[in-house]
Image: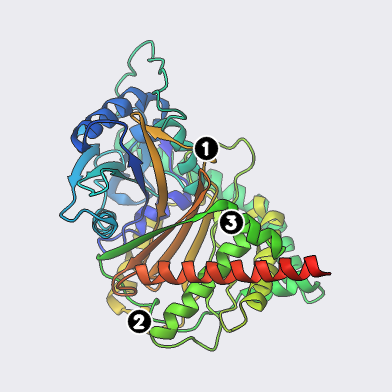
Amino acid sequence: MRPLSGVDAAFLHLETANTPMHIASLSLFDLAGGDGRSFHARVKRELGRRLHLAPVLQRRLAPMPLGFANPVWLEGEDVDLDHHVRRVTLPQPGGLAELEDCAARLHAQLLDRDRPLWQLFVIDGLGSGQVGYYFKVHHAALDGQAGMLLTRTLFDASPQPAAIRRPKRAAAPARRPGAIELATAALRHDLDRYRDLARSLPDAVRTIGGLLGPSQGAEEGMLARNLAFGPRTPLNVQVTAQRAFAGLSLPMGALKEVSEALAVTINDLVLALCAGALRRYLSRHGGIPRRPLIAAMPISLRVPGDTEYTTRAAMPPVNLHTDLADPLARLRAIHASAGAVKTAMQQGRGLVPMDFPSIGLPWALRGLVGLYARSRVSNFVTPMANLVISNVQGPPAPLYAAGARMRHYWPMSIVTHGLGLNITTTSYAGEMGFGFVAAQAAVEDPRELADALAAAFDEFGELARRGSRRTRRK
């Protein structure tokens, strides 16, 4: 029996039919032989051999009596692979659009909380002869960085599947705790959390006061300017269950060349590309707001060696400076804004609570979520952030599943009321995969955004080339 952290459990309490709280990925594989049916069978067989290496895939929720506190994880649960590993065939003509539409539909479906919180869909019927691989897992179980750890179990580093050492004996079935045992565990957990919070409060107050105090320098001043509300945009509306998705892959080598030529980080460039894409998109959908858009930017708080399957991240705001028409000026401003945020998170890394008391919290959060949805307040309130932009470092070398090579990898994440667009990026084998997940109520066709981001990349590439030519002439 393992308690959920406060942050992990919050994803459960915030979930509704219109706002699923799982994260996912869509991959495209080059088949090494056979067809989609045989690939599905091989993938299921391979995954069955590896389940004992990934305990997160064998966890199931045990709810508290009356749901008065956070549930706990039961370890070593039986996994019905026929339920968790499924096969889908695309309609004709089986192109990228059909694959993206299929992934969007799958992404809109809730996971069954009576089972381990993950599913895998092998998607065949592509005209290219390739096969899609959609994998989703609840955010209560892990975050993006932990998801990258999971790839070590799901995939191989070569076409030859790894030799898996079977456990010497099968794990005993998990014992179901009784109501008194669960309630006692919740009370003990909360007492520990109150003690931890009391100990950390003085340091937290000093750190926050130091970061936002009036005597700080330029970087801290930029941090304070990030703490602003975003403008009203078509992205910030009440959402329904319908989702839309588009994927885009850009060459990692070219991204590095541009970022080095313009003296910014890859993350700065990703934010600037998103800002440029949003300006192009909004110019055709309601106009570019005078106030700059604000992005919620997840930042990992993991320390080296932390391999826990849980969420260890904060999501501070960062100013995208979309009010600046000059792309280079916008990039420089984003570089300053994002740098200030990262510095602040590094200084306060140990003070951001990942766990907190939970007795009564599920009732409160579910009540607030229901009230927020029924009031439709997200349709008219000024948003604290306009979208989510996340950048996760992925594996640099190619990965394989059942002998087939993964050609592309596109991450997929969460949208919710008032935040109808999520752009997540993950590096993989010489590419940067951009996943545009949108509520259809906010963005009907995210392919527009993907094309706009590709145009923004071309623009920055030309700026980098001009700068290089000027440097050579000097």
The residue singled out by tag 3 in the image is 254
Residue placed at 76% from the left, 66% from the top? 210
| Residue 292 in view, yes or no | yes
Please give the label number shown on residue 431. none
Q: Give the amino acid at mark 3.
A: Ala
The residue singled out by tag 1 in the image is 397
Q: Distance from label 3 to label 2 (Cα)?
A: 39 Å
User: Which residue occupies the extreme top position in the image?
Assistant: 168
The residue singled out by tag 2 in the image is 379
- Name the image colouring: rainbow
Label 2 CA crowd tier, 10 Å (few <14, some 14–19, many 20+):
some
Residue 352 quadrant: bottom right
Residue placed at 25% from the left, 53% from the top? 106
Residue placed at 63% from the left, 55% from the top? 256
Q: Distance from label 1 to label 3 (Cα)?
A: 17 Å
57 lies above or below 457: above
